[in-house]
Amino acid sequence: MNRIKSGVYGLNSLLDGGIVANSSTVVIGTAGAGKTTFALQYIMRGMETGEDGVFISLDENQQQILREAEDMGFKNIRNFIERGKLVFIDASGEQFGAFIKQELPSFVDKWEGVKSRIVIDPLTPVLWALPEKYEQREVISFLIKELRKVGTVLCTLEEHSSYGGVYGAETEIPMYLADSVIHLDYNVTGEDVERKLRVLKCRSSRHSEKAVDYQIIGGLGVILHHDIPHPGKKMEIDEETRSVLEEKFSGLPISVRNRVSNVFGNLEESELPKDDLIRLAADIVEEYKHIEAPAKKRPTKKTKKKGTKAKEGGDDE
Ligand SMILES: Nc1ncnc2c1ncn2[C@@H]1O[C@H](COP(=O)(O)OP(=O)(O)OP(=O)(O)O)[C@@H](O)[C@H]1O
Ligand SMILES: [Mg+2]
C-alpha cells in the first residue's frame, strides 16, 4: 500500500508507516487543540518533497492562515504559493457547498497529476450550510470521492462538547465517511493542560489504539510522545518461547497451524506486547480444542462394480 508521511513527528508509527495515499482523513478536536497546525504541517511536509498542496480555509482568510503558519515556524509557506506549488482557497461554508455541487467535477477533471495533498480546514461550516442530514451525507461523500481521485485529503472537524463530543450529531457523518479519524483531545483543568492524540479509525490498516501525549512546539508544530516502535521491526522470539509455541500449536488442525505459525513468525513489535504471546497461543489452542481429528476414510469395497458411483454419507470432498 502506498503511504505518505504525515509531517507530524511520531504519528507515522501509529499509522503503520503513514497515511494511505489517496485516502481521506478527518482530524477532530476542540477549539485550540491544534487542528490548523496539524493541517499546515501535513501540507508543508508534502511540498518539502515535491508534492503540490491545496489549502481550503473555511474559517480564516489567507492572510490569517499564512501569518499563523509563519508564527508556527513554517517560514517558507509564501514561497510555495509564489511558485504555484500551494493553491490557497478561502470561502464560506455556503460558497464551498455550492462549489462542491456545481464545479467540483470539472475542477477535478482539469487537475494534472495525482500527487497532491488537499486540506479543508475546518469542514464544519459545510455541514452547517446543509441542514438536512441526507444532504450532508451526499455532499460530503461526493466531496471525498472526487478529491481522492487527485490527492490525499485531510479535513479538520470541530468537536463541540455540547453536541456530545467526538460522536456528536454533526461529526458522525464525516467520521463514518472518512478512511481515517484522528482525535486531538485537549483538556484544561486548573493550571494543567492535557493533550492526547488517538487514532480512532484507520481503514484497511493496522494502527495503534493508544492515546498518546502530544505537544505543540514553535518551528515543529504538533509532536507526539510515545515509545511505540516504528513499523517493520520484527518481534524477536527467543528459543524457549518458540519451542513452547511449537508444542502448543502441534495439536491444531493443519490449516490453522500453518496460518497461525505464519502470523506469529511475522509479528512486528508494534503489534503485540511480547509478554502476550503465550497467552494468545493458549487462547488459540482453546478455540480449537473440541475439534476431533478427522475420521479415517472407510476402505472402498473391492466388490463394487466399475462405473457405479458410491454415495456414502456425503463425504465426497
Ligand atoms: N508558536 C507556537 N508555539 C507553541 N504553541 C503554539 C504556537 N502557536 C500556537 N500554539 C498553540 O497552538 C494552539 C492553537 O492551535 P491551532 O490554531 O492549530 O488550533 P485549532 O484546533 O485549529 O484551533 P481553532 O479551533 O480555534 O481553529 C494555541 O492555542 C497554542 O496553544
Ligand atoms: Mg483552526
Image (cartoon, helix red, strand yellow):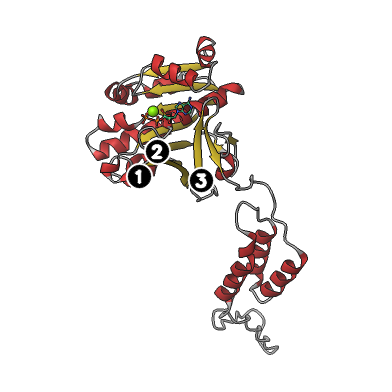
What amino acid does circle 2 point to?
Ile
Quadrant the C terminus occupies = bottom right
Residue position marked by numbered label 1 in the rendering: 166
Q: Residue furthest front?
A: 191
Q: Are marks 2 and 1 in contact (CB under 8 Å)?
A: yes
Residue 184 visible in this rendered orientation of the protein = no
Secondary structure of the residue carrying tag 1 is helix
Q: Residue furthest left?
A: 131
Quarter-of-image position of residue 195? top left
Question: How far, Cα to Cα, is label 2 from label 1?
Answer: 7 Å
Please rate how many residues cluster around mark 2, counting C-alpha atoms within 10 Å: few if below 14, some from 14 to 19, many from 20. Answer: many
In the image, what residue occupies the spot 40% across and 27% down? 120
Indicate yes or no: mark 1 CB to ligand 1 under 8 Å: no
Question: How far, Cα to Cα, is label 2 from label 3?
Answer: 15 Å
Where residue 233 appears, as percent x and y from the top left, is 69, 48
Mark 2 or 1, nearer chain start: 2
Quarter-of-image position of residue 266? bottom right
What amino acid does circle 3 point to?
Val
Secondary structure of the residue carrying tag 2 is strand
Quarter-of-image position of residue 246? bottom right
Where residue 106 appears, as percent x and y from the top left, is 40, 20
Query: Which quadrant of the render holds ligand 1?
Result: top left
Q: Are marks 2 and 3 in contact (CB under 8 Å)?
A: no
Q: Is residue 100 above or below residue 8?
A: above
Residue position marked by numbered label 3 in the rendering: 212
What amino acid does circle 1 point to?
Val
Mark 2 or 3, nearer chain start: 2
Question: How far, Cα to Cα, is label 3 from label 1?
Answer: 17 Å
The label number, if any, that marks residue 28 in the structure image:
2
Q: Residue furthest top?
A: 82
Where residue 11 appears, as percent x and y from the top left, is 55, 39
The label number, if any, that marks residue 67 in the structure image:
none
